[in-house]
Amino acid sequence: MLSVEKEAGMDVSGKTAVITGGASGIGLATAARLAFAGAKLVLADIEQEPLDQAVKELQATGAEVLGVTCDVAKLGDVERLRDATISEFGAAHVVFNNAGVGGGPTIGSPIEMWRWVSSVNLDGVVHGVHVFLPLLLEQDEGHIVNTASLAGLGGVPGMGPYCATKFAVVGLTESLFYDLALRRSKVAASVLCPGFVRTRIAQSARNMPDDLKGLSASGELASLEGVASAAVAAGIDPAVVAEHVAGAIERAEFWILPHQHVAVRTTEQRLGWMQGGTPATIDLDKATRGG
Ligand SMILES: NC(=O)c1ccc[n+]([C@@H]2O[C@H](COP(=O)([O-])OP(=O)(O)OC[C@H]3O[C@@H](n4cnc5c(N)ncnc54)[C@H](O)[C@@H]3O)[C@@H](O)[C@H]2O)c1
């Protein structure tokens, strides 16, 4: 059995944090929280205008911020992000692979939907880890935070492609955690699994490739998006999630569970199901409120 020593956490003051999906929601709130703690920021996003706005707003608070337009689904863009980070700030310490999109159900989604959701939510995280991890290992300092979801801890109806990618991100990050422990590396890894958070995730279609926009306008998809939008609108404030992310970096904690109660309950139910009990169901109401 692998014994794992607890890593010391990181004081982010004067360190550089790279945040993908940094122009909105959880990414932007975390940027503001880390800047408050004295971190320099590199915000990466596919949306130019919100990115420019976010950079301006954070700079107005006195933060040092670089904005980089980047599609995390493209390895070359993430390599460009690394190069821009190094040339501006000389190093990266926190890498928050957070950009993500919601997608359709397993039944009825065009294959292009699977590919798009997977390219952003999974390939995007893989690219961030692949490109930045060698730098962190070399300096033997840093923290990788990957964004999954409660949908990475239990199956959710109507969200097959999204669940598939979020389970994968949990698996990838857990595996990375053990790799780092085996090397006795000072680099830390965390996975973020929130329930519903009040962000623009339900409007993810704004970033779909044009060919998918036409294909995905089915009635079934629209009604599912309605359910998701209502839950997201009733979700917790992204600043609450940002506080959890900052705390996990400061204390080197692996699991970041802003809805810890639901995460644990869902996992217990799945365990019971594996042992012959009834299927687990995520409590939508509790997954909206924090705790
Ligand atoms: N909001 C929730 O309820 C919730 C719950 C669990 C997990 N999450 C996860 O949190 C993460 C952040 O989402 P959010 O809720 O803040 O939504 P959001 O839409 O407010 O922010 C996501 C950001 O990612 C950017 N983005 C999308 N595709 C991109 C790409 N290809 N390359 C670079 N940037 C891209 C968007 O432009 C946007 O700025 C996602 O991974 C999401 O799956 C959200």
Image (tube, grey):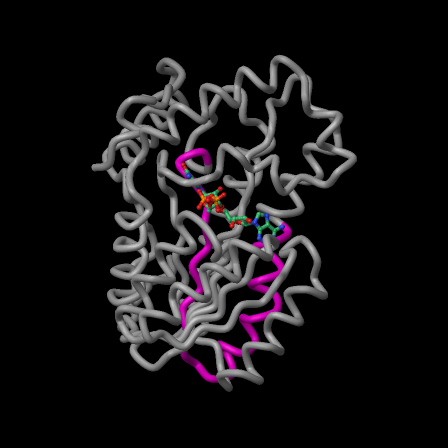
Residue 254 image-quadrant placement: bottom left
> 177 or 256: nearer the eye?
256
> 284 or 253: nearer the eye?
284
* Residue 162, x across and y down, in percent: 55, 34
* Residue 55, x across and y down, in percent: 46, 65
40 is higher (above) or lower (below) than 242: below
> 148 or 22: nearer the eye?
22
Q: Main secondary structure of the magenta part?
A: helix
90 to the left or right of 131: left
Is 44 a magenta residue? no
Q: Is residue 97 visible?
A: yes
245 is higher (above) or lower (below) than 88: above
Quadrant placement of the C terminus: top left
Q: Residue at point 31% right, 70% down? A: 61
Is 146 a magenta residue? yes
262 is higher (above) or lower (below) than 158: below
Residue 186 image-quadrant placement: bottom left
* Residue 12, x across and y down, in percent: 31, 74
232 to the left or right of 252: right
Residue range (magenta): 123-151
* Residue 103, x across and y down, in percent: 59, 31
Quadrant placement of the N terminus: bottom left
Residue 199 image-quadrant placement: top left
